[in-house]
């Protein structure tokens, strides 16, 4: 093979390898979809902030509360039978619950390690609600399962279980 043909062939080989490399790695850079977020971890400060955001939404309106949940979230509510699945069913619950003007406070909180972009927070909370003409405390237990969604880049509630605490001295 002539020297000039070998040089041309080598040039074609280099171009082909370069083209394959560009095609193999370029789609990630050219993609219009956002890259998944890195590993987000649940922390004590984050758990507090997420509860505060949800509790503040309780003082606004059902739609604001519902936006703290994923589209397909599951709610096992304190004062109604469940499960309630999806934002429409969850909204129905909060339409009625917010009529009592609830204000929550965390009594205890435990964070259960759950890996990347998932956080489990459980404990005891108390709601102060309107009952007739008085404000009364309603102690309850809770579990929130949060997921970090890369779009809209925020933590949302995927599962929320809340149940009334057993009363002291109640039959076992």
Image: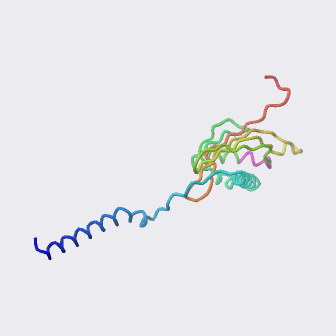
The percent coordinates of residue 61 (x first, y second) are: 72, 54
User: Please, is residue 8 above or below residue 166 in the view?
Assistant: below
Residue positioned most to the right: 134
Work out whether residue 159 or residue 14 is closer to the camera in this orientation and state it.
14
Residue 132's image quarter? top right
Q: Is residue 54 magenta?
A: no
The percent coordinates of residue 55 (x first, y second) are: 75, 52
Work out whether residue 23 or residue 84 is closer to the camera in this orientation and state it.
23
Query: Which residue is pictured at 64% across the width and 54% down the height?
Result: 67
The percent coordinates of residue 110 (x first, y second) are: 72, 43
Query: Going by the image, does 107 lie left or right of 74?
Result: right
Q: Which residues are magenta?
A: 95-103
Query: Which residue is pictured at 70% across the width and 37% down the height?
Result: 80
Query: Going by the image, does 143 lie left or right of 13?
Result: right
Q: Quadrant of the C terminus?
A: top right
Residue positioned most to the left: 1
Q: Quadrant of the N terminus?
A: bottom left
């Amino acid at each position: 093979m002539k020297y000039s043909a070998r040089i041309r062939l080598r040039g074609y080989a280099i171009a082909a390898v370069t083209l394959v490399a560009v095609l193999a790695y370029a789609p990630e850079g050219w993609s219009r979809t956002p890259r998944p977020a890195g590993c987000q971890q649940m922390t004590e400060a984050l758990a507090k902030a997420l509860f505060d955001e949800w509790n503040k939404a309780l003082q606004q309106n059902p739609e604001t509360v519902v936006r703290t949940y994923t589209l397909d979230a599951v709610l096992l509510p304190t004062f109604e039978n469940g499960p309630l699945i999806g934002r429409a069913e969850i909204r129905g619950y909060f339409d009625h619950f917010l009529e009592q003007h609830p204000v929550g406070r965390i009594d205890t909180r435990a964070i259960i390690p759950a890996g990347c972009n998932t956080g489990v927070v459980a404990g005891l909370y108390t709601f102060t609600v309107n009952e007739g003409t008085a404000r009364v405390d309603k102690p309850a237990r809770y579990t929130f399962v949060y997921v970090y969604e890369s779009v809209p880049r925020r933590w949302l509630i995927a599962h929320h279980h809340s149940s009334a605490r057993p009363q002291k001295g109640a039959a076992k």
